[in-house]
Image (spheres, grey):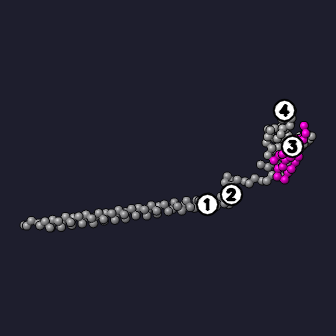
Amino acid sequence: MTNPSPATAEKKALLRAFDTVLKTQADEREAEQRAAEARRLARARSRPLMWVCAAVMIFITGYLWVEQPEWVFPARAQPESMAVKEASLRIGMANAAQHVERYRQRNGRLPASLSEAGAHGGEIDYEALGADGWRLMGSNGPARLTLTSAEPLTKFLGNSFEVISRRRS
């Protein structure tokens, strides 16, 4: 028997390396195919869940659109009637008048403004008329009223508190 030549040993080593490369590539292809199959199965399992979620969302959207429940769509506030606006203005003006009178009694003179008297005027204007007289002019939307120091507050207020208490919330 003859000794294998060094060229055949190199050929055998080269053949083994080639077999190793082919086997590694086959293993990688097989791993990729298994991963692709796993992804396909995962998609197949999640698809029915997506359909169920979409159906639930469509149902909820339809319910909200048709029923318009108050917990999602709060009821719109009804506009106040003219009587309620006027009663509210009368109460506000009476409050401002009480502040003006209280200021006059404590300081012996009329205030220069409603804020000096401690009143929050809003839509109420104040005007001093001499030493002890004053006038309040107020507006609340289309309701416009005037109150002078000569008018008694009870007469000016009338049934304003009753009107306010009967209004719908």
Q: Secondary structure at mark 2?
A: loop
Which residue in the protein does label 3 denote? 127
> What amino acid does circle 4 point to?
Asn
- Return the residue at label 2: 68
Q: Secondary structure at mark 4?
A: helix
Label ID, residue 107? 4
In percent of the image, x 34 and y 65: which residue is there? 29
- Crowdedness near tag 1: few (<14), some (14–19) or many (≥20) residues, C-alpha within 10 Å: few
Tell me what residue is drawn at x 46 percent, y 62 percent: 43
Identify which amino acid the numbered label 2 is placed on.
Gln
Task: Categorize mark 4 by other alpha carbons within 10 Å: few (<14), some (14-19), many (20+).
Answer: few
- In the image, 112 versus 74, the foreground residue is 112
- On whether residue 124 falls in the magenta region, the answer is yes
Q: Which residue is mark 1?
A: 59
| Percent x, y of residue 87 | 85, 46
Q: Nearer the viewer, mark 1 or mark 4?
A: 4
Which residue of the protein is positioned furthest toward the right in this rendering? Answer: 150
How packed mark 3 is, by other alpha carbons closer than 10 Å (few <14, some 14-19, many 20 or more), is some
Picture layout, residue 141 above or below residue 33: above
Q: CA distance from mark 1 to mark 4?
A: 69 Å
Dot placed on the residue nearer the N-terminal end, 4 or 3: 4
Question: Which segment is the magenta one?
Answer: 123-146
Q: Is residue 159 above or below residue 60?
A: above
- Residue 36 percent coordinates (x, y): 40, 64
Quick check: marks 1 and 4 in contact, CB under 8 Å?
no
* Horizontal relation, residue 167 to residue 2: left or right: right
Label 2–label 1 contact, CB within 8 A: no
From the image, state whether disc 2 or disc 4 is nearer to you. 4
Q: Which mark sits nearer the N-terminus, 3 or 1? A: 1
Alpha carbons under labels 2 and 1: distance apart: 13 Å
Q: Residue 165 appears in which quarter of the rendering?
A: top right
The overriding secondary structure of the stretch rendered in magenta is: strand
